[in-house]
Image (cartoon, rainbow, N blue to C red):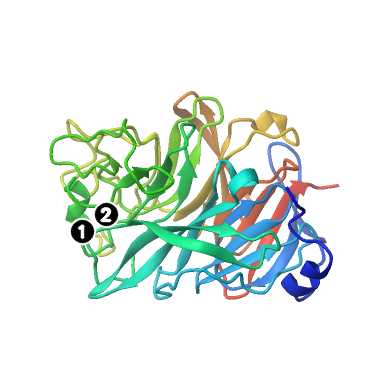
Amino acid sequence: MRPLLAGVAILVALSGMMAPAIAQKRYPSSAGDLAVETVASGLEHPWGLAFLPDGHMLVTERPGRLRLVSAKGELSRPVTGVPNVVARGQGGLLGIALDPDFGQNRLVYLSFAEPRAGGNGTSVARGKLNAQGTALTDVTVIFRQMPTIASNLHFGSRLVFDRTGALFVTVGERFTQRDQAQNPANDLGKIIRIRPDGSIPADNPKKPGWAPEIWSIGHRNVQGATLHPDTGQLWTAEHGARGGDEINTPKAGLNYGWPIITYGVDYSGAKIGEGTAKPGMEQPLFYWDPSIAPSGAAFYTGAVWPQWRNSLFVGALAGSLLARLSTEGEKVTGEERLLTDIGVRIREVVQGPDGFLYLLTDEEGGKLLRVRPAK
């Protein structure tokens, strides 16, 4: 594969200087003090992060821009070819994933709030990143959440490839349509599973009355998703209302309860649904009450903190912290709250190829941060 940036392409693609990678503060943890460094700044509500094979990064910004960030923290001009988005409320350019064969096909997948007649909806597009990292070409929408809804809330959305090469898409129930999370005939409040071209995998549940793209139902607004490094099982972090943020392991054909069962209450304080359990509906592996507003999730597999192997790291928007959940199989065995006074909303969590953790902060002047052991 040709280097992503070379020669003149650097002058074309990159503008601005990187923010200096200087440790801002020491944060205590069970694995020793942590340092948080600013890798890049000047991002507007960054949302999703993907590492390229050469160490560069792609970052989505909610207003509708895709940026290339060099290994040194330099920001590119916006990559061209990105679909138009509805950048209102929680909508905009959202999740990102690289094709499992990116090294050969250079395909990038983006989830976004798509403007449509009568409203909007979560959609997924794929396109080919050119060798210079300046443009997406041959961009095609491969999935559209249906029906279209006039709402600016609860779009989801994370993108995760499973080990078969199928693509999981997390979509919200659009807030005003929460009861539709229990309707398996539509895409509201579901986990979607499609092939990279948008076709339907042969091993999807395809239960009677279920739309063929649906993997599981009864979800509210999933903004964190990742695969378990040992089992390949999908794990998700899902927003509750007031309380009831959940960690789930969505499995084919199962119902995760929203809005019939929940550990939260409505924003008014009113009861939601029928309680916390009901036959035929799955229990979360873990839940937060009060809410931390989870967004972004990644299992740790690196050598920097071997004692944290298979811990699930989850960013928090309301809590402004990084949660570390220790796991054993499909059990959450404990929680450690890190960076509790960092003072910013953590939107995304990714393990880098260097074994450090990388975070995106959800701010008008958002940052790409690196978490490493303090020296």
Residue furthest to the left = 209
User: Above or below — where is 74 with respect to 258?
Assistant: below
Report the disc number at residue 270.
Answer: 1
Kindly indicate the quadrant of the structure image that contains residue 293: bottom left
Classify residue 66 as left or right of residue 95: right
Residue 72: percent from the left, percent from the top? Answer: 80, 60
Classify residue 311 as left or right of residue 262: right
- Neighbor class of circle 2 (other Cα within 10 Å; few <14, some 14-19, many 20+) is some
Classify residue 330 as left or right of residue 356: left
Instruction: Tell me whether the residue at label 2 lies in contact with that at label 1, contact meaning CB atoms closer than 8 angstroms.
Output: yes
For the residue marked with disc 1, what is the amino acid? Ala
| Helix, strand or loop for disc 2 | loop
Residue 57: percent from the left, percent from the top? Answer: 67, 56
What residue is drawn where x is 22% and y is 50%?
A: 181
What residue is drawn where x is 24% and y is 58%?
A: 146
| Helix, strand or loop for disc 1 | loop
**Mark 2, residue position:** 265
Residue 183: percent from the left, percent from the top? Answer: 16, 48
For the residue marked with disc 2, what is the amino acid? Val
Q: 304 or 62, which is in the foreground?
A: 62
